[in-house]
Image (cartoon, coloured by chain):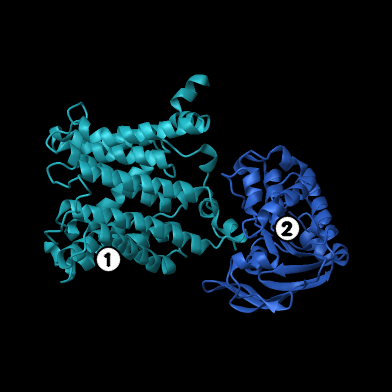
Chain colours: A blue, B cyan
Amino acid sequence: MRLEIKDLHVHYGKIEAIKGVSVVVNEGEIVTLIGANGAGKTTMLKTISGLRPVTTGQIIFDGKDISKVPAHERVDLGISQAPEGRGIFPGMTVLENLEMGKFHRKNRKAEMQEDLEKVYHLFPRLKERVSQAGGTLSGGEQQMLAIGRALMTRPKVLLLDEPSMGLAPQMIANIFRIITEINKTGVTILLVEQNAQQALQRAHRAYILETGNIVKEAKASDLLNDPAVREAYLGTGAH
Amino acid sequence: MKIRNYWNLRDFGANLWENASRPKRVAIALISIGFVALLPFMGASFLATPIASYDAVLVYPVGMFVLMSLGLNIVVGKSGMLDLGYVAFFAIGAYTMAILGTTTKLNTWEVMPIGIALSMIAGVLLGIPTLRLRGDYLAIVTLGFGEIVRLVLLNSSWSKGPNGIANVPMPPNIGPLKFELENQKVFFWVVMAMILLTIWMIRRLTVRRPGRAWEAIRQDEDAAELMGVHTLKYKIWSFTLGAAVGGAAGVLYASKNLYIAPEMFTLNVSILILACVVFGGIGNIWGVVIGATILGYLPDRIRFISDARLLVFGLVLVIVMNFRPDGLLPRKKREKAIVKREANA
């Protein structure tokens, strides 16, 4: 289940947000896309999940170009996104949120309990809050819910948009530990982050995105020790 | 806290219903329906409307407002799309009845499915290009649609322009039940049946796939799409069902009023129906029913103060919305949060 993005261009009106980006995510990998605000990270994920239309370029998943496939059908193919800023359904309970993750599956009754158990195993906190409204959860719990809900769709590739945003340091460490755990169950992960330190420690490979262009691609561990990267993303300037 | 619960009519009602056994539920439903069906006979009580005929008021505005508000509530309340041109579907239904009723031998019941179908087709045709828009943009486009329909009716020869269409036939009698202008009880029962049918339809859909899809779309459209909800399809469905109810109301309205003209289908109607929905409690069927009943009934009840009645009407709206910003009978709390996030680059 290789995900390959080839020479992708994406526009918002006349403004070009993504200017010819190529990214490869191999099966079983955690790949991270790091960059500052406005670099185009979220746009990249939205384009892969289908929320933003592609101007030109290809998104090849499992050997097929899916750049024209509508977002709701990409879920069936195995691409699932936990949106930035959580994007949970604030008025639904935790359980109803998780159940929405099975909306696209026909025989969802049979799988439902099994997958709910898996999610509760990863996030025991969610089990304690099953009947609580999503909007009343803390930031960290909402992030867990967003990831849990994405997992309910049985993704082959999980797209995570800034899972650390706005969370306390302890919660950040916790979320990243779980991301590694999810990856070990065979889910390929494309992780977009501003928190470069954590992301690079967890990822296999990394891309650095600056104003719509990939400026660097390397093994994550190499980037951690790269002086220029340390200066720009891991120093005092890091978020 | 206990005392508060008594004042929370929604939860009080919901508890009563959920704790009731099946026979008890049937009894509650039958008694309520029976009570409403007997409303036209209560004209001699304090309910009486001065000047306007009481049972006529129950049909229009009250019954029609309830019916249309329920239809609009599918669009605005259930799936969260602001539709300011709802009157267009009402007009399409009404003109279908007027034109077919005066030029063919089809009676009201035979025109009804045609009127509904045409409204739905209009809903789909409008929906496909415009439901990609969100929020304010959709509101403007639907507002324009409402005006376009009215202006077309005003300027076309087949609709007899500003003169409107007169001599629309009344519905044929149903057995011993006669449709009369002086005595509109039968009209009321027909509207009531249509309202019950609409409530039944909405309740069925709400607990099934479409209901969950609408709820997800209303709360976060992008997230819904990411969960595999074909958002455009479900939005068009919602829009079209709302249109169908509006069209059905239009057919009956033309057949009751016997005369229709473009001036009856102005933006005011759309706004008034929207006000009924918001006033009663957006998204909650029973709230909407109560809101539309009050807003339909009140102006006629206080007609004796003549010109000041609209002032009172406005005051009631302002005061109630200040004390109950979510409407008289709001939807459940946890369903209320609507988060609209800007598209983020």
Q: Secondary structure at mark 1?
A: helix
Residue at (43%, 29%) from the top-left corner? B9
Q: Secondary structure at mark 2?
A: loop
Q: Is residue B156 left or right of residue B210?
A: left
Residue B66 visible, this orientation: no
Q: Nearer the viewer, residue B200 or B151?
A: B200
The x, y position of residue B271, in whole percent, is: 30, 50
Quarter of the figure with the C terminus of chain A: bottom right
Q: Nearer the viewer, residue A193 or A121?
A: A121
Chain of the residue where label 2 is placed in the rendered structure: A
- For mark 1, what is the residue? B148
Q: Is residue B177 left or right of residue A136?
A: left
The x, y position of residue B36, in whole percent, is: 30, 35
* Circles 1 and 2 on the same chain: no
The x, y position of residue B251, in whole percent, is: 25, 57
Q: Quadrant of residue A134?
A: top right
- For mark 2, what is the residue? A194
Q: Quadrant of residue A105?
A: bottom right
Q: Is residue B249 left or right of residue B138?
A: left
Residue A65 visible, this orientation: yes
